[in-house]
Amino acid sequence: MKIIDAHMHYCKAEGFDELAKLSGGENTREFWQKTCEENHVVFSVAMGNSYVSPSRFGGVTPRLIDLGSRGEPFSCEPYNQAPNVGYCLGVQSEDITKENAEKTAQEFEWYLQHDPHCLGIKFYMGYQNVYLYDERHEPLFELAEAYHVPVAMHSGETANHHGRLRYAHPLTVDEAAGKHPGVKFVICHVGNPWIPDAIEVAAKNENVYIDFSGLWEYHLTPEREEQLAAFEQYIRMWLTYQGIWDRILYGSDWPLINIADNIRNLGKIVPEKYWPQFYYENALRVYGRIGDLLK
């Protein structure tokens, strides 16, 4: 079975090396490629959250990825990351103002124009104390629609106490998705712990999808898997109730989790007859540029 990982990280951010060790691996390009081969992951979508690109137009520049083979900074001319890894441009929302919003969109558009590996735009709500539907984001939503790329949003709990959860609630996606029906929105992490809310937002809005990344951490021992059984059944219950199997995406949040453990456990939530959609086909529809990169 072919798999697309629709949410992982591909950078040397602080703490990621230790997370990879706790998950039984290494935070390196070589280890990720080996892991993909062993687990039939044919393509990965990395969330830009590391290297900040130089300014070309005087706007806020996107966060990128930087797990190149020799530790060099990110480049797309030529592309120096793994060919089976694409990326979403990370947004520093707090730095965007009414005055620089259009120039910021120009900064992001440059990558969408010049790099086929640029797959979408990622908002870090909760880590950035701004609502997704804030007016400062409008030029970026317009850009996403023009280039037919999705908008992904961190949703749910944050990894540190500095985050503000009200900005990361999945219900905030309903505001943006309703205003921009021509843009595909991805609620990351199933909005955990607001899982029914995230599923309802997707059920209500045909342009909203959910990725199943970051639901657990590190290696999953038999004892931990037993503890998670009720949690997994709870998610499956809500998915079955709404029937949105065509709008859920497999994701890992690597290096947070052991990939083999993650694939196995998410398969307990999604019925086997929907595995082709969940693990592969839905991601191709959302991150449309992947299709050309796989040819």
Image (cartoon, grey):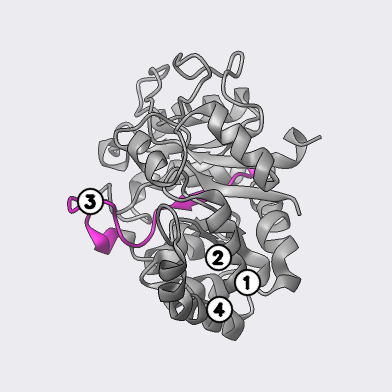
Q: Mark 2 and mark 4 in contact? Answer it, CB < 8 Å.
A: no
Disc 4 + disc 1, Cβ < 8 Å: yes
- Amino acid type of the residue tagged 2 in the rendering: Asn
C-alpha distance separating marks 2 and 4: 12 Å
Question: In the image, is 198 to the left or to the right of 111?
Answer: left
Of label 4 and label 1, which has the lower sequence position?
Answer: 4
Which disc is residue 100 wearing? Answer: none
Read off the magenta span.
Answer: 147-167
Note whether residue 118 is visible. Answer: no
- Residue under the point 56% across and 75% down: 203
Point out residue 77 in the picture as x, y percentages from the top left corner. Answer: 59, 14
Residue at 45% x, 16% y is: 71
Question: Which corner quadrant holds the C terminus?
Answer: top right
Q: Earlier in the sequence, mark 3 or mark 4?
A: 3
Residue 288: x percent and y percent?
A: 69, 45
- Give the residue pinned by disc 1: 270
- Residue annotated with mark 3: 160
Please, what secondary structure does the residue beneath circle 4 have? helix
Q: CA distance from mark 2 to mark 1?
A: 9 Å
For marks 2 and 1, give the one nearer the viewer: 2
Side of 159 where 195 appears, left or right: right
Residue type indicated by callout 4: Arg
- Element at label 2: helix
Residue 74 falls left or right of residue 250: left
Of residues 116 and 1, the one nearer the viewer is 1
Q: For label 2, count other residues whose C-alpha is less than 10 Å away and answer few (under 14), some (14-19) or many (20+).
A: some
Q: Is residue 55 magenta?
A: no
**Crowd rating for badge 4 (residues with CA inside 10 Å; few <14, some 14–19, many 20+):** some
Q: Which residue is mark 4?
A: 236
Q: Find out whether residue 154 is within the magenta segment.
A: yes
Residue under label 2, please give it: 265
Q: Residues within 10 Å of mark 1 (few under 14, many from 20)?
A: many
